[in-house]
Amino acid sequence: MKNFWVRTASATVYAILFLGSIYSGRLLGNAVAGTVILTAFALFVAIGCTFEFYRLVGKQGATPSRWLGYLMAAFVTAVLSLINLPVSGGVVGNVVMCLFILGIFVGTPLAIALQLWKHSERPFADAMYTLLPVLYIALPMGLMSALHYDYNVLVMCIIMVWVNDCFAYMGGSLVGKHKMWPRHSPGKTWEGTAIGVVAAVLVGVFIGPLFVTPMGWYDWAVLGFVCGVIGTLGDLSESMLKRSVDVKDSGNIMPGHGGFLDRFDSLLFILPVVAAYCFLLK
């Protein structure tokens, strides 16, 4: 019972911080301030996820250039969050893309060149470990802030991920028989996963249209499917990383729930797809 209350309390704090960051602009009546607050939250999560990633791969013997990885992760997250900054003119978007490209094309050769001063037996592998969090973590978190222009889409995606997780767990517990990927996630079953995806789609179709957005029910069906299927792949991928170093949780930032990667593994895979879909609809 004590563990239940610990998990509940930490989940409540997490929800308040996350949703409070998303709705901060509306609560303050200032869209620019809201973007800044959500970006600060995204930066906090991005650096936390990057720290956990480096700690996990370090158990495999990898020696990434951590300071460069943190710098690039922070830079990419902050820059991408400016895409939809509510200020006049389309110049901002062009500047953002130029800075993003510049950061990637400067950081990549630098990550490789730094290996010249190390004594790694796998210099290019370590350089890639340095850069991977930029694509795996910083890019999605930056795009989360970029989606700030539409609170409803972002919040609905979080709801659909939560519904998918809950129904996949319940469905797997009740009727699950066929293991999905026993090597990386022994508890996941094909039956539970299918139930979770269907639940996410239904929530999108029936609840999504209640929000004021330019999306129709079919758009919400697509996003529900994305949250169910792509989110599951994100969860499995993070489980694969943890299994490879024989750890249960990526960290302990949330008592009873694990670390940053444990909480954001699905969203890290989902957000780029959702952002691309929303930008195409604009």
Image: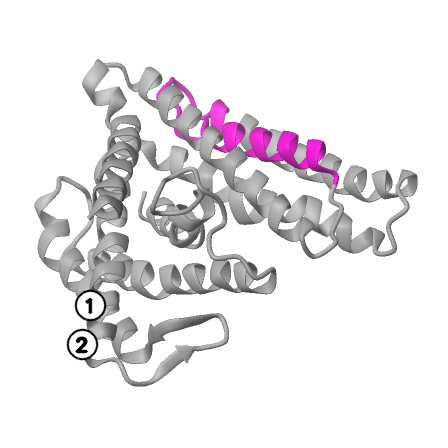
User: Around disc 1, counting alpha carbons within 10 Å, would you say few (fewer than 14), some (14 to 19), or many (20 or more)?
Assistant: some
User: Measuring 12% from the left and 42% from the top, which residue is drawn there?
Assistant: 211
| Along the line of sight, the residue nearer the viewer: 65 or 145 | 65
- Position in image of residue 247 (x %, y %): 53, 57
In this view, the residue farthest toward the front is 2
On the rendered image, what quadrant is the C terminus found in?
top left
Give the camera-side residue of 238 and 116.
238
**Residue 144 locus on image (x, y percent):** 39, 38
Instruction: Give neighbour class at mark 2: few <14, some 14-19, many 20+ (Cα, 10 Å).
Output: few
Q: Amino acid at mark 1?
A: Met
Return the x and y of residue 245 as percentages of the image width and height.
60, 60
Magenta region, mostly helix, strand or loop? helix
Residue pointed to by mark 2: 174
> At x 57% / y 30%, what residue is drawn?
74
* Residue 31 part of the magenta segment: no
Which amino acid type corresponds to the residue marked 2 in the rendered image?
A: Leu
Is residue 85 shown left or right of residue 213? right
Q: CA distance from mark 1 to mark 2?
A: 6 Å
- The answer to whether residue 271 is seen in the rendering is no
User: In the image, which residues are magenta?
Assistant: 65-93
The residue lying toward the viewer, choosing from 85 and 196, is 196
Image spot of residue 184 (x, y percent): 49, 70
Count of number-bearing discs: 2
Q: Which residue is mark 1?
A: 170
Q: Residue at x 72, y 51 (%)?
A: 128
Q: Please give the label number shown on residue 277.
A: none
Compared with 50, 13 (above or below) is: above
272 to 180, vertically: above or below: above
- Kindly indicate whether the residue at mark 2 contacts the one at mark 1 (C-beta within 8 angstroms): yes
**Residue 106 seen in the current view:** yes
